[in-house]
Image (spheres, rainbow, N blue to C red):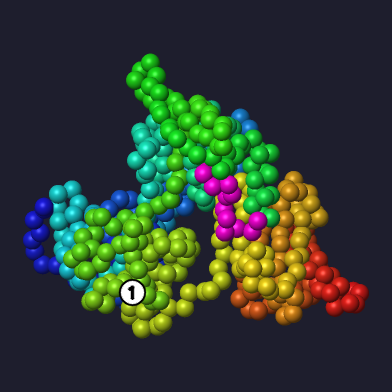
Amino acid sequence: MTNVSGQASLYDLIVIGSGPGGQRAAVQAAKLGKKVAVIEKDLLGGACLQLGTIPSKALRESALMAQAGDMSLLGVMERTRRIIREEREVIEKSLRRNDIEFVRGTGRFQDSNTVIVEHEGVARKLSGRFILIATGTRPRRAAEFDFDGFTVFDSDTILQMKFQPRTMLVVGAGVIGVEYASIFARTGVRVTLFDSKAEILRNIDAGIVAALKKQFKKNGMRLKLGWTLHSVETVPGETGRAWRADATMSRDDEVVTEKYDAVLVCQGRTGNFELLNLSAVGLKPDERGTLDVDANYRTSATSGNIYAVGDIIGAPALAASSSEQGRLAALHMFTGAEASFPETFPYGIYTIPEISTVGVREEDLRARGVRFVVGVANYSELARGKMIEDEFGFLKLIVHEQTRRIMGVHVIGTGATELVHIGQLCMAFGATVDFLVDNVFNYPTLAEAYKVAAYNARNQLTDLEGTSL
């Protein structure tokens, strides 16, 4: 182990990890006049910027911008890497502007107030009044897959792909799997989306999922759901390089072996904790590699000064929620303010087409015996939908039958992740469906879908009341 010498540098807050949660906590503490250091073992921005949210969404936008034949998959990936570099510069400027020290290296606990940072054989000691763990997660790598980086990839290594596959098997139909499957399908790759479960995205509105699957098939994607995967074997080419994967799978009495140029495995994530020396502060992650925290994001460390935010604490594991957790954790550290994370917040899934949701689903309300109506606006009803040639998208409003309040919004189609915020704000302020009917929306816009869906819902409520509108 590298020797550590000299006095420790003193800080009010030491942040381990520079993703959204770590960044936001650091900036909030700095704005309170605190001395802050951010430790990052890799490039600034963490996995979110280098390997996760930003790359996958940038790749999606690049794929959407590329007309058929105008940009290859490799060209799309190069544009994605440029966006990552530019976003990293934005983060660097933010840290400098707030006088936050960036410390490159791997951080590990020595005790509850001390972190040792090692980088290229040099070790440095940092001492902090508070320490925040924001180390995120990484793809879970099942032993049955040979992640060679040539034929079999995970969501971290897929951005380093050096060839244009003709066919691809995506194993795992969770959020990451369906996002990448739709992106590669858009670039002309013949994609097969596989999952052992019969349905995808089971926490999303069933009508939205059905529409998404329909679009997947329309775009040439094959869905193999409810199958069992027995093996994926890479086959060496003449140069010794693994250039093909043979996947054997079955369902009922049918057994097939299919050949793919590439395999992308997306089967969950696990916390990054191994290098932290958590035992030095009395912390132990669960079987998923995540840490337990209280309502203020404080861990169970007896010292009471160690917090954790972001994916390392589990669901919802979103970049946006991680950022807000970081802000709230810093406020609790230095002001004692009790954290108040919003009960209702949106989920965005950046498939092609994209989907977004906030609030409750029809299925949830039926299970609870709550009476409601559903107002729907199809993009095909909107002038803007016709202009942008997106006539399959739609927006659903879930409206309580008695109070007339908006309880949920579910959108699929162009701009879904932007449109959902209108519904989020309506719900946050307790707006009724009448608020949407009685207000003016720009025309022509996709946002007009709210007014159309509100009319649809209000007509149903009027019918239930036994009157006519």
Left of 46 or right of it: where is 245? right
Residue occupying the point 78% across, 69% down: 457
Q: Is residue 391 visible?
A: yes
The answer to whether any part of residue 75 appears in the image is no
What percent of the width, then of the height, locates residue 178? 55, 46
Quadrant assignment, res 148 = top left
Whole-percent x, y for residue 216 in the image: 64, 42
Q: Residue at x 18, y 48 (%)?
A: 120
Question: Which residue range is magenta in the image?
Answer: 195-206
Asked whether, in this view, residue 170 is left or right of residue 218, the answer is left
User: In the rendered view, does 167 fall on the left or right side of 155?
Assistant: right
**Mark 1, residue position:** 298
From this view, report whether residue 303 is shown above or below residue 214: below
Residue in front for this viewpoint, 331 or 207: 207
Quadrant showing the C terminus: bottom right
Q: Amino acid at mark 1?
A: Arg
> Left of 189 or right of it: where is 341?
left
Instruction: Spot the residue most to the top.
Output: 238
Residue sitting farthest toward the bottom: 336
Quadrant location of residue 397? bottom right
Q: Nearer the viewer, residue 416 or 286?
A: 286
Instruction: Please tell me whether residue 158 is drawn above or below residue 344 in the rendered image.
Output: above
Q: Residue furthest front?
A: 253
Check if residue 273 falls in the magenta segment: no
Q: In the image, what residue occupies the spot 39% across and 69% down?
A: 326
**Is 198 colored magenta in this rendering?**
yes
Secondary structure mostly taken by the magenta-highlighted segment of the chain: loop
